[in-house]
């Protein structure tokens, strides 16, 4: 296997980071967000990098209306040539937590925030702002949903489950720690 060494200058490749998310499409890998450790501080980078698998080149993408900025330990769900970014925190971790859904379109390099409302106008149907959770796409009875599971709020961790209807633009609480109606399995 032959290795290619690229001659790059500072700024041509993403800085080493943690708390970022990575997704891929048919020819590219995307690095979204994360924080960078400098000798005197941490900086959260609300940026998107694309690595082309054919040319072996990095490119920082510049989106119009980039709508996410608390981009450490957020979640990302890939859908065709777009990504949905949800949650995340900045530094100090857990002090500020984002709860929006941002859509990144990799073809048009545009970004927008999805509108959202609680199901039946019941506020507990809106998910708690968290970071470190998962976001997954599923089609249930023909309707597309995003499922948000778990996450942290500072030193508090959850295993809550919410779903977002991509058709109706509403959140619904499916399972919440501490609900009296939760059916917990018996200890074994």
Image (cartoon, rainbow, N blue to C red):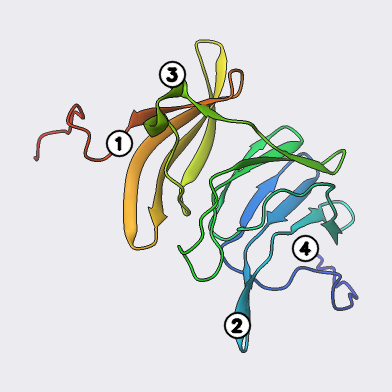
Q: Is residue 160 left or right of residue 145?
A: left
Q: Is residue 96 visible?
A: yes
Chain-order first, disc 4 or disc 1: 4
**Location of the C terminus (image quadrant):** top left
Q: Is the C-beta separation of discs 4 and 3 under 8 Å?
A: no
Residue contact at pointers 1 and 2, CB within 8 angstroms = no
Distance from label 1 to label 2 (Cα)? Answer: 36 Å
Q: Which residue is mark 3?
A: 120
Around disc 3, counting alpha carbons within 10 Å, would you say few (fewer than 14), some (14 to 19), or many (20 or more)?
few
Question: Does dot 3 land on a helix, a strand or a loop?
Answer: helix
Q: Nearer the viewer, mark 4 or mark 2?
A: 2
Mark 1 or mark 3, whichever is nearer to me: 3
Which label belongs to residue 41?
2
Residue located farthest toward the top when viewing the structure as drawn = 141
Return the residue nearer the eye: 51 or 76: 76
Q: Residue at x 77, y 36 (%)?
A: 81
* 27 shown above or below 39: above
Circle 1 sits on which residue?
A: 176
Q: Are marks 4 and 1 in contact (CB under 8 Å)?
A: no
State which quadrant residue 160 falls in: top left
User: Residue 1: which disc?
Assistant: 4
Q: Is residue 42 above or below residue 106?
A: below
Camera-nearest label, 4 or 1: 1
Q: Residues within 10 Å of mark 2 (few under 14, many from 20)?
A: few
Do the numbered discs 3 and 2 sit on residues whose CB atoms are within 8 Å?
Answer: no
149 displayed left or right of 55: left
Q: Secondary structure at mark 1?
A: loop
Q: CA distance from mark 1 to mark 3?
A: 17 Å
Q: Nearer the viewer, mark 4 or mark 3?
A: 3
Where is residue 64? Give x, y as percent: 85, 47
Gap between marks 4 and 2, in whole Å? 39 Å
When asked about the image quadrant of residue 20, the answer is bottom right
């Amino acid at each position: 296997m032959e290795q290619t060494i690229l001659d790059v200058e500072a700024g041509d490749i993403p800085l080493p980071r943690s708390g970022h998310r990575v997704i891929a499409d048919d020819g590219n890998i995307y690095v979204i967000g994360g924080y960078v450790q400098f000798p005197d501080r941490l900086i959260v980078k609300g940026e998107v990098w694309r690595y082309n698998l054919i040319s072996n080149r990095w490119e920082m993408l510049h989106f119009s209306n980039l709508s996410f900025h608390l981009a450490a330990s957020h979640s990302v769900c890939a859908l065709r040539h777009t990504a949905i970014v949800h949650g995340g925190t900045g530094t100090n971790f857990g002090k500020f937590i984002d709860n929006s859904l941002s859509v990144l379109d990799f073809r048009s390099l545009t970004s927008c925030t999805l509108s959202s409302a609680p199901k039946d106008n019941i506020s507990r149907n809106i998910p708690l702002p968290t970071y470190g959770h998962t976001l997954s796409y599923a089609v249930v009875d023909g309707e597309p949903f995003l499922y948000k599971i778990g996450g942290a709020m500072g030193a508090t961790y959850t295993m809550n489950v919410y779903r977002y209807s991509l058709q109706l633009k509403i959140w619904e609480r499916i399972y919440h720690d501490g609900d009296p109606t939760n059916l917990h399995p018996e200890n074994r």
